[in-house]
Image (tube, rainbow, N blue to C red):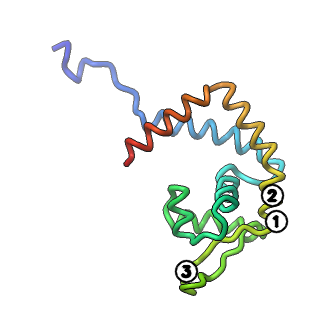
Amino acid sequence: MADSPESAPPEPCTCSALRRATRAVTTVYDAALRPVGLRVTQFAILRLLERLGPTPVTRLAAEAALERTTMGRNLEPLERRGLVRIAAGQADARERVAVLTEAGRDAVATAMPYWRDAQTRINARVEPGSVAALAQALTSAAS
């Protein structure tokens, strides 16, 4: 009976461990970005828009691996602050397109040194190659 599942030590839950780790890392980035009034999730969306240019909200959500409705909720405070503008699509006026404003570009530039500081502190604790390997393994597993 030594090999029965009941006698084996409980295996740590991968999901719980990853969620704990991401909450801890998010806390570091959020604290670093606090002086510029952004959360790391907002900063990531602004950087994504900076890279992609004007993007339909549906595609932006897919690029960020978020549900479309979640992306919409995340864009609302950015739009209120004037960092993002939501426009009608050119081909289909019902389509909503997210556009990074000049104030949004300025916010990314202002936040970048704070983000880099958090990145440096995290990378001092965790070898960056390990993070890349984990991200690749998890992306493969999720496909």
What is the three-letter code of the residue carrying label 3? Glu
Which of these two is toward me, 75 or 11?
Answer: 75
Disc 1 packing (10 Å; few <14; some 14–19; many ≥20): few
User: x, y (%) of residue 127?
Assistant: 61, 26
Local SS, label 3: loop
Of the pair 4 and 141, the residue shown nearer to us: 141
Q: CA distance from mark 3 to mark 2?
A: 26 Å
Mark 2 element type: helix
Whether residue 116 sits left or right of residue 95 in the image: it is right
Amino acid type, callout 2: Ala
Residue 73 percent coordinates (x, y):
60, 66
What residue is shown at x 70% (from left), y 66% (from top)? 77
Residue at position x 79%, y 61% in the image? 105
Residue at image location 69% in from the left, 71% down from the top: 99
Q: Identify whether 66 is placed above or below 7.
A: below
Task: Name which residue lies at 69% across and 55% down.
Answer: 47
- Quadrant of image for the N terminus: top left
Q: Quadrant of residue 15?
A: top left
Q: Which mark is residue 95?
A: 3
Residue 122: x percent and y percent? 67, 32
Q: Which mark is residue 107?
A: 2
- In the image, taking residue 36 as reference, residue 25 lies left or right, namely left
Q: Nearer the viewer, residue 65 or 92?
A: 92
Distance in Å between CA atoms under marks 1 and 2: 6 Å
Q: Given the current orientation, which residue lies at the most extreme top position?
A: 2
> Label 1's element?
helix
Discs 1, 2 touching: Cβ within 8 Å: yes
Q: Quick check: 92 above or below 105?
A: below
Residue 119 in percent (x, y) is at 70, 37
Apparent side of residue 43 relative to residue 129 in the rendered image (left or right):
right
Measured Cα–Cα span from mark 3 to mark 1: 23 Å
Disc 1: which residue: 103
